Image (cartoon, coloured by chain):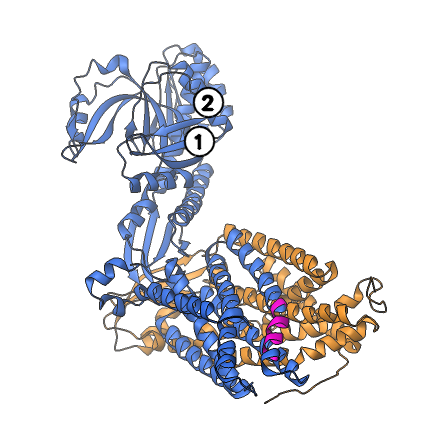
Chain colours: A blue, B orange
Amino acid sequence: MKKVGGRLLLLALVVVLSVIFFIPSYQPLYQGLPAWVKQVMPNKGITLGLDLQGGIHLVMEVDEDRAVEIAVDRSVVSLQDVLLDKKIPVESVARTGPTQITIQFQNGELKAQIQKMIDDYPIFSETESAGSANKLVWELREAEGKRIKDSAINQALETIRNRIDQFGVAEPIVLRQGLKQIVVQLPGVKEPKRARDLIKETALLEFKMLDEDNQAKFDLPARIPKDKEADVLKQVEGKLPEGDQILFERGVDKDTGREYRIPYLVKKRVMLTGDVLNDAKVSIGQFNDPYVSITFDGKGGREFERITGDNIKKRMAVVLDNTIYSAPVIQDRITGGHAQITGNFSMQEANDLAIVLRAGALPAPLKIIQDLTVGPSLGKDSIEKGIQATLFAGAMVVIFMIVYYRLSGVIADFALMLNLLCLIGALSALNATLTLPGIAGIVLTIGMGVDSNVLIFERIREELRLGKAVRLAVDGGYDKALLTIVDSHVTTLITGVALFLFGTGPIKGFAVTLCLGIGINLFTALIGTKVIFDLLNQRHKVGQLSI
Amino acid sequence: MLEILGKTSIDFMGKRRWAFLFSGIMVLLGIIALIQIGRGAANLGIDFSGGTAVQLKFDQPIRIDEARKVLEANGLGNAELQEFGQDNKLLIRLKASTTIEEKIADRVVAVFTKEFSSNHFVVDSSTEIGPTIGSKLQEDALIAIVISFAGIILYVAARFELRFGIAAALATFHDVLAVLGAFYLLDKEITLLVVTALLTLAGYSMTDTVVVFDRIRENLRMRRRETEETIINNAVNQVLSRTIVTSLTVVLVLIPLTLAGGEVLHDFSLALLGGVIFGTYSSIFVASPLLLLWPGASGRMLKGS
């Protein structure tokens, strides 16, 4: 028999730690603590999931018409590129209605040539109204419009799911409601505004060239306060060169901390979009300023290399949702498919930007049309009933163990409590979100905990039947049960780890409690109860074991 | 000492033909259920199938349990209810979608108008809703399950022998399919909670099987003169009291949950209850006899003796 002192100390330490971590999960107790205690204590605990506690309920609407316009705009840009490449001189290519493109040209002989190009844009059809010799009007086919709208909402759904996943909100509900609405429910989010912004941001990343040749013609102010953008736009209204627009760079004054805007004349043509991103992550610059470094995919990387190679010494704007984040001068051809987005970010802003860039852009802006606090999705009444039934069931097990195994049953019950305490402590320490699937994981590990004790006790009984002395029987029982317990736990742990690594949502919630519970089980079954048996043996030299 | 069972020597292996027949039927049922789920023809919960959401705003606070009772009395028992903190709002999600004859939302409104005549309400919104479990989540879950099975087979094969790994995985699969099949037969709704229960029972069944296997392995090492069939029979008998006590304890937990845990927990607990019964049965009557099916196993002595 080994010494018990060290193991007892370990046991006590685990209990104390569990209690300390658990306290913030129980707000009435936590709030009652003196301020100085709160300062040194962990301040976050378990969050209860949507099914158990509720959270925020957002109903959003996808601006479908805008999605169609964006798709048409994209065709306009692509058509402009092709015309430029083929050196076909046209006067203008523009979207002239929600679903209409008008192409104007001086030279009427070009008409047949341009007319043929519609073959490459099968989502459009030529309208008859274009009787003029110098004009062509393309109209988006109705079926295509419908398809774009439908895919816009599905894409928005997936994008929002991705973003929330990466934001680290456990087990949200994201679903499509009706034809163009999306419902999002988030459990007990600590920063609801940040979560909302993260969901809503369109996150359309574009690279555009500044029109430096023409910028001088306009007497653009160097720096304007935030919210004064409209004044600048009014000043230049109607005077902008064809294919140009004014966009604003955002900045923060280091001294006053106030936000300002810098207007730039930018070519409308989109050189590259965020579609070609592979990854986006936060990095820290040399002055401790966070920025987002992005990696293009193969095609995007080659394209980026070509664009930067063609535009050395010119300025390129990094535009996100029509705001310029930075407009650096291209020093050299950029190979390797990496780029940076800088722009006076706080750490949190940089983090959120990386998330939305990774998750992809929304196909169209979203409008929040309902924003409510919602109760538990399982219904308050069911939860109350469930808690009562669980307490009753727990009591039954405790009593059963004592009736069947007597004093040893008490020890097993102690192990059970220890198990629960440690598990709740560990979940609190991880700031986990507890949902019903998570509780199912706890139930399973508690079942396994009981099983471990039953295994050990049955083995001890077998040893006793063979006529062994109590101390030898206890040691023998533990030794023989050890391998079984380890094997059964490791097998279940493998399931748990696989579910944790590859599962999402509720599957993951289940896996987290399962994995933690199994680890804790091994500890309580092999060390927790053994040390008590040893203690009993040491103190009393028991001749008979109550088992 | 209090004992449920004394020393037993039941010939479990001798009954394996009957067990295989019964299990075969259950597995077949489970496979049919799986196919029906895949085709979308099974009774899938709102999490998977989508349905209708009706949001009502009442003048006075409404008790969610009363609302549930009233819906159930009018044949809308599988509604999911959720209340909003402010404004006495109630969100009712129903699986059934609108048919040509009747709009399901109208039926909900009619029920509340009739039963809560003193508490006036307006319909905030009433729309079709999509499933909360996206296809990606389903795919992820499937991948996770396949990988965990592979992991289990590998681990058990490494710790025991390959046939133990395969038998354990098959037995676990059997239990999940059997419960799924039973639910399909009873026309129970397959909700997210039921799926969670299936995962939980897979874990339980696995543990149970490994415990029995462990004893078989131990006996295989010690008693080299007997046939494997006898050794396995003895091992199962030796762990029988443990098997019964553990299963009984878990059943003890699940019966109150099934009977009094409320409508929402009922199916979840029922699936777990089925899982414990099948899990216990399968570790004795499926997993262990499967070991004997391995080519040449039933009559042979242990290698290396």
Q: Is residue A481 magenta?
A: yes
The image quadrant where one finds the N terminus of chain A is bottom right
Q: Are marks 1 and 2 on the same chain?
A: yes
Q: Earlier in the sequence, mark 1 or mark 2?
A: 1
Chain ID at mark 1: A
Q: Position of residue A82 (x, y in %)?
A: 45, 19
Report which residue position mark 2 lands on. Answer: A303
Report which residue position mark 1 lands on. Answer: A295
Considering the whole magenta stretch, tell me its main secondary structure.
helix
The image quadrant where one finds the C terminus of chain A is bottom right
What amino acid type is highlighted by mark number 1? Thr
Residue at image location 21% in from the left, 25% down from the top: A263
Please state the extent of the stretch shown in magenta in the rendering.
A473-483
* Residue farthest along the bottom direction in this orientation: B2
Quadrant assignment, res A314: top left
Q: Nearer the viewer, residue A137 or B98?
A: B98
On screen, residue B221 versus residue A136, left or right, reads: right
Residue at image location 77% in from the left, 75% down from the top: B13
Q: Position of residue B196 (x, y in %)?
A: 52, 64
